[in-house]
Amino acid sequence: MNLTDTHCHIHEDDYGLDPDETIISARDSGVGKLICVGTTAGSSVKAAEFVKNRDNVWFSIGQHPHEAKDFGETEKSMMKSLVGDDNLVAVGECGLDYWYSHSSKPDQEECLRWQLDLASQNNLPVIFHNRGSKDNPRDAFDDLWRILDGYKAIRGVVHSFSADSNILEQILERDLIVGINGIMTFTKDSAQLEALDAVPLDKILLETDAPYLTPPPFRGSINEPKHLVEVAKFIANRKGVNLKSLAKVTSETVSQIFSI
């Protein structure tokens, strides 16, 4: 079995565990490839440095919607400077997040559009972070579709999927991939689980979002890539497939989207 954690943050200074021991533990558990995801321009630079001289570890560049208000010319230049790095596999995480109001909606949209332009110009996939408001879980997705439908041939993954079947349908209509992590292993929301059941196997990517969203039986501890195995087991059980089959299909999707 060879799984890929397509979304983790073990490169951050505050991760909390030794990153090299973390990578070794992941590989020993069957998680042989990792993507370290940037959340700001500075975080993206750290990710680029982190993956150097580490085998089977790649990175993405992105400005999270919470940080959109701080996305100026300096940050744009920092991100542009990383384009062309052999270890760069995606733009993101980026998108719209209306759950909190850390950045205004206009700032979030401007930041997202810049990153979509960067991805489009450089033929890179996008890692989307999208979350609706407390009153309307679909509002951020409605705005995402309005923006995204103005672009041609944007490919990518909707990270940390926790929405319902209606949103899933719109994701699949746009030929995007669904990122599944520990949320699904501990959610009590039947609509989320029903949506998971409806995702075709070849439209799933596995992720941890480490250090966040630790799955059972490790709840309460720092999440790490080796715990991806628990997410995979949960999905395989829901889908009625064996773990080896799930690993094979998701590995093919990883190769298709990220070219690794």
Image (cartoon, helix red, strand yellow):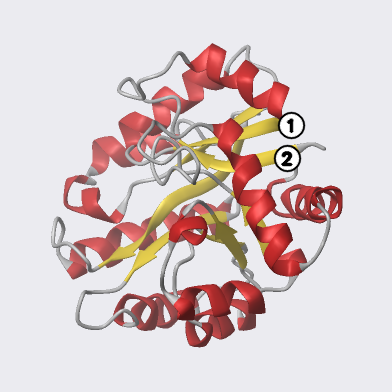
Q: Residues within 10 Å of mark 1 (few under 14, many from 20)?
A: some
Q: Residues within 10 Å of mark 2 (few under 14, many from 20)?
A: many
Disc nearer the start of the sequence (1/2):
2
Task: Residue type at mark 2: give it.
Answer: Leu
Q: Nearer the viewer, residue 16 or 155?
A: 16
Residue 217: give x, y in percent of width and height.
50, 41
Against 154, residue 209 (above or below) is above
Dot 2: what SS? strand
Residue identifier under label 1: 30
On the question of residue 5 being in view, the answer is no
Dot 1: what SS? loop
Residue identifier under label 2: 3
Q: Check the picture and name the quadrant holding the C terminus.
A: top right
Residue drawn where x is 56% and y is 58% of the image? 180
- Disc ID at residue 179: none
Q: Is residue 18 left or right of residue 24?
A: left
Residue 51: give x, y in percent of width and height.
56, 21
Residue drawn where x is 25% and y is 83% of the image? 136
Q: Are marks 1 and 2 in contact (CB under 8 Å)?
A: yes
Q: Nearer the viewer, residue 240 or 47?
A: 240
Task: Residue type at mark 1: give it.
Answer: Gly
Looking at the image, the residue that sits furthest to the bottom is 166
On the question of residue 212 being in view, the answer is yes
